[in-house]
Structures are given as structure tokens and as C-alpha cells.
Image: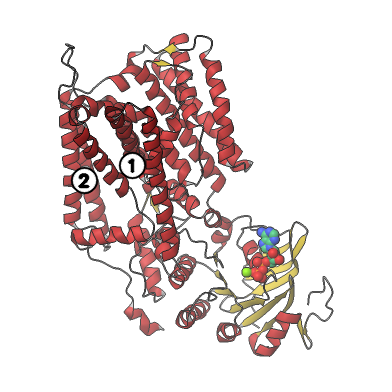
Amino acid sequence: MSAQITEVDVPSAGDTAGIGQAVRDYFARVRGGDIGSLPAVLGLVALVILFGVLEGGTFLSIFNFANLINQSAAIIVLAMGLVFVLLLGEIDLSAGFAAGTAAAVLAVVLTNMGMAWPIALLAALLTGVVIGLVIGLLVARLGIPSFVVTLAMFLALQGAMLLIIGEGGTIPIRDDAILVVMNGNMPVILGWVLAVVIVGGFAIINLLAINRRRKAGLAAESMSVWAAKVIALGVLVVVATYLLNQERQLATANVVIQGVPWVVVVILGLLVVLTFILQRTGFGRHIYAVGGNREAARRAGINVKGLMITCFIFCSTLAAVAGVLLASRDNSVSPTTGGAQTLLFAVGAAVIGGTSLFGGRGKVRDAVIGGLVIAVIANGLPLITQQSGIQFVVTGLVLLVAASVDAISRRRASATGR
Amino acid sequence: MANDTPLLSLRGINKSFGPVHVLQNVDLDVRAGRVTALVGDNGAGKSTLIKAIAGIHPFDSGQVTFEGKPVTIHGPKQANDLGIEVVYQDLALCDNLDVVHNMFLGREVKSGVTLNETTMEKRAGETLSGLSVRTLKSLRQQVSSLSGGQRQTVAIARAVLWNSKLVILDEPTAALGVAQTEQVLNLVRRLADNGLGVILISHNMNDVQAVADDIACLYLGQMAAQVEKDQVSSQQVVELITTGRSGDIGMQDNSMGGAA
Ligand SMILES: Nc1ncnc2c1ncn2[C@@H]1O[C@H](COP(=O)(O)OP(=O)(O)O)[C@@H](O)[C@H]1O
Ligand SMILES: [Mg+2]
């Protein structure tokens, strides 16, 4: 037995060899059932090209690009919250109206009670926390399926919204600090600073990680792969910043509108913080564990119930943030805020982005990519056809394709294993 | 038998699931440095017994003594803190996590709030090397892409990664081929030779003959007999498993509650 120890071939020091190896590794992961967000990214590129060819002038206009961000922001944030719940293999159907309820609280505190915006914002976020806590307790402690609990909450919150908003029907938002989030743009120079921070931060963090692994004598990503990633991100960020920094007001108006929308900072901030939580902390790791094998997580001593409650709180609180974005975008809150297709689009965004409905697989960035896909469809199709029915059908089909990819890659995973 | 106090000692253990009285007045002694084979037919209560030792579900009544001190094990964390590690029959791995993540699940090494991936990967690599594991392509491979034998190895490696005093393996060779079974049995033997207490649950008489020092036989939720391996033949063990008695060993009165 001891003689065999010398033959040990546990992967050891040395870097993975170049981009070719990185691509092969990716396909190995796909075979293992982890398809990631590549299909969504390819879909996004394909859609942009398609609409660009069919309706070039309007769809690819600079004005429309900023518009796209505006349209997708709330759905992206909602979807980010849903990722936490979907990772557990649960669902939150009430997130849309949690957003609406939080927005209603914001509007009442801000406009009706005349309080300062930080208090109103805090009240809105707290609303989200309480909603998530209630859902979490019912699901984790009582063991009611999340589908049922959140379906009930879907109805109850719709009613709560009506009660909070009151007879008036619509409450206007006039506070500048809230309005600027969805209606204001960064100064041009600040936009470029942001671009440098994003690309530089990405490059440095990844470089440090590579160095750390090298020092520990572990296989690390090769420099060519690192450089390729940094350059790809750099090109993307610079092009986007350049486009958003162009003057994009229609010729008839005489105000200058240019710069990166402030909401981009909100989304990037959430993306970074939430990704850190999911990928780099024990809490995040345990979320994946519970989604992958709940019983195994329990036997490993993980507090499964507490973790589930926390995830529902994350979901509803992020929904509250989305509600604030909706209020800011519409300059008002009405009983339809967060209603209609908001939730379905958000679930669709997460799944299209690559988050599995079966739990255990998904990332925060899926929400961003999937949200953009949904927004591109919602934005591009009306330019081609006047029939809004087609838009629903197409969005539904895209979601179905994403869910199929999810199911098939999961099947392949269980076929390779064992 | 050795003169020192047992590492783990169970006395009068009872466990029911609703109306089903799965464990009845079970006694068991496990000594350090010895492999105790826990045998018994399907449904005899072997998995139930070790899950309770691991803190997955508590015993209804009975005394548990670990290293001479009476203990009550409320949860998996507490069992781990005592130095008890279990390789479950279903392995209890998360398919969507990689090998390192699975080995450190619930006990991640952190620096501040962030996970210390490099330290975990190094320690995982060292442990697997120590177990002569030669088939894993990458420690960052998701467990879903591993073969049955590889998964078994990861589960065992997770149990020996810690400074454990008692390692319990629930049918670790059931799904393995000849070569891998041999490897796992060698490993089990080595754990005991290093001074750990080992409980090995197995159906396979060859496995039991190969590595066991003591044999404890559960029959319909009762401990039919706990004997040293050298005192019994394979034939007698099979009789104990199937009928609860063999000659003057085992349950002389085959009625309920008549543990040896
Ligand atoms: N969680 C449970 N709930 C109800 N009955 C159970 C549970 N776990 C095990 N049992 C029952 O306890 C008995 C012993 O099962 P088990 O310990 O798995 O047997 P073994 O591992 O010896 O084959 C079986 O009859 C089984 O059906
Ligand atoms: Mg069993």
C-alpha cells in the first residue's frame, strides 16, 4: 500500500496551460452539468445583432442603449434577490409585490408624511426585511412549500399595497435624491473613472488570486487567460462608457443628456457585494450546499433553517431595492407598481442567465445577463412588430429554451456522475 | 479484549420512529486501535444506530460514554467536536460543489470573513495523497463528475481530514469494484493501526474477515452479540445475522427485549 503513495497524481503545482486548456476546462464543466451563463451571453449578442440588422437605426441608437439599462434595472435587482432563493431550490412568487409594497411605503413616508429620503429608504428596506422574514419562517419553520407561501403573499401584498397607497390611487415622488437614481447620469469624467475602477479592480483582484495560489504551490490560471479576460472586459466597459457618454437627447430638446446612468453604480455595487457573499464567504458556500444536497448540508452541521430564512430576507430586501428603483423611474407609486409581468420577467431573467430552477447552480451575474436579454427583447420587438402579443410569446419561448438548457444540463450531470 | 476503557460505549440504547421500535436496548463498545465490524441484515438498524451516534437524530433513551465521560450528542457539530466522523451510506456529498468544498463543508477554513481556498485546497490535496488517491484529475472538479469509487474516496478523505478519534463507515465498499474495495479496506485497517477507533458497517463477510477485530451483530434492532473476531467463524457470524443466535452465542431467548 505504502508503495503506491509515490504514484500519487493529485494535481499539484504548475499553471493550467493557456487559453486552450481554459476552454477545455469549460467544456469539462459543461459536461459536469455546469453550463453557466455562456448560452445567455451568446443569446444576448445574437439578439442585439438580430435587432440591429432588422431595425438598425432605432435599436442601436445611443438613446436606446441608455433606455435599455433603465428598463432592465429593476428586473435585474429583483432577479439578483431571486437567485438567493432559487439557489436553495425554492421560489418567491411574491417578490414583485414585495417591491411594490416597499415602494408604497417609500412613497407614503416621503410624500404623505414628508420625511427625509434616508428615513423613507430605510422604511422601504425594512418592509422588505419583514416580508422576507415572514416568508422564511413559514417555509423553514412550518415547512409549507415556498410556492404556496409566496403565492399567498402574492395576493396578500397586493392587498397591502392598496391599503398603504389609499384612496388616491397614485402617490407622486418628488424627492430629488430618489429621482436621480433612475433619471440622473454621472458626469462624463466620473463615468470614465468608474470604467477604470471596474477594469483595474477586476485585473488586480484576479492577479492577486493567481499570485496567492502560486505562492501556495497550487495550479493557477495562466497569465494569458488572465490577460484575455481583462482585455475582453476592458473593451466591453470602454465601449459602453463611450456610448453612454455621448450626447443622446433628441434634436428637438435643448438640454444635454449624456453620461453613465447612476443606476449603473447601484447595480454594479450590488453585483460586487452579492457575488462576494455568494462566492467568498462561508454563508454563500452553505447556500450552494443546501441547494445541492439539503440532507448532506444538515449532516455537515449547517443550520439549514436559519440559512433559508436569511435567503428569503435577502430576496425580499433586494425586491424592496427594486421597488425604490421602480418608484424612481415612474416618478410615482401606484397599485400596479411591481405588478403585471415584473416578477415573471425577473424569474425569467435569473433562469435565462443560467440559474437553475432545481437549486444549487447560479450566480448573481446571471441576473444581470438575463435581465439584459429580457430588456433587449422587450425593447427590440416593438420596433419590429406592433403586436404586443408576439412579445409575450417570444419572451415565453426564450424562457422555455433557458429552462430546457437547465434541465438538459442537469440530466447530463447525473449521467456523468457515478 | 483490551483492558483500557472503551473509546465509545453505548448502554441500553432505544430509538423509535413513530410506532416502529428500531433500536431496542442496544449495548456497544468500540475500542481505540481496533476495527469494530457492525453487521446485521437489511433493516436491522445499523444506519439508525450510527446516525444517532453522529448526532443526526437523538437516541430516545440510553447512555453514551465517550473516552470514559458520559455525553449527550445533540447535533453533527457536537459529534465532530468530540472527534467522531461518519462516512454515510449515501456519502452525503453535494454534487454541485467541488472536491475541496465538499471535504470542508460546514468546517471551512476562513481568514476573516472570506474563505481561505488555498489552505483548504492544500490540506485536501495532502489528505488525498496520504490515502493514495490516484484517480482525481482536479481537486476543483465538481463531485457530480466523479465515478462511484472517487466519490467514496472523497467521502472517506473528508472523515480523516480532521483530528478524528472515531471514524464510522456505513457500507463503504458496497458500490465498489475489487481493487477499490481492497484499497478502502487497507485504509480502514491503517486508521485503526494509527490508534483511531473504527466502526465498519458491512454486509460482506470477506470484508469483515479481512479487517475486523471485533464483530457486533444487530438482529432486528437488538444487539445479538459482540464478540472478538477470532472467537467466531464466518459461518457463526452468518448465523448470528440471519437468526440472532449461533450455538451458545447470541440471543438465547428469541423474544423481544432479550438482548444478550
Ligand atoms: N427516518 C426514518 N423514519 C422511519 N423509519 C426509519 C427511518 N430510518 C430508518 N427507519 C426504519 O428503521 C429500520 C432500520 O433501518 P436502517 O437503520 O436503515 O437499517 P440498516 O442500515 O441496518 O439496513 C428500518 O425498518 C427502516 O425502515
Ligand atoms: Mg444501512
In the rendered view, would you say B62 is above or below A309?
below
Q: Is residue A351 left or right of residue B106?
A: left
Q: What label sits on residue A365 in the rendered view?
A: 1
In the rendered image, residue B143, in percent from the top left (x then y), is placed at 42, 62
Q: Quadrant of ligand 2?
A: bottom right
Q: Is residue A89 left or right of residue A41?
A: right
Q: Is residue B24 visible?
A: yes
In the rendered view, would you say B48 is above or below B198?
above
Q: Amino acid at mark 1?
A: Arg
Residue found 66% across the figure and 83% down from its top: B1
Please state the chain letter of the residue tagged with numbered disc 1 in the rendered image: A
Q: In what quadrant of the picture does the N terminus of chain A appear?
A: bottom left
The part of the image, by quadrant, that contains residue B217 is: bottom right
In the rendered view, would you say B250 is above or below A411?
below
Q: Nearer the viewer, residue A237 or B121?
A: A237
Q: Nearer the viewer, residue B30 or B216?
A: B216
Q: Earlier in the sequence, mark 1 or mark 2?
A: 2
Mark 2: few, some, or many residues within 10 Å (few <14, many ≥20)? few
Q: Nearer the viewer, residue A45 or B129?
A: A45
Q: Residue under circle 2?
A: A204
Mark 1: few, some, or many residues within 10 Å (few <14, many ≥20)? many
The part of the image, by quadrant, that contains residue B211 is: bottom right
In the rendered image, residue A266, in percent from the top left (x then y), is placed at 32, 30
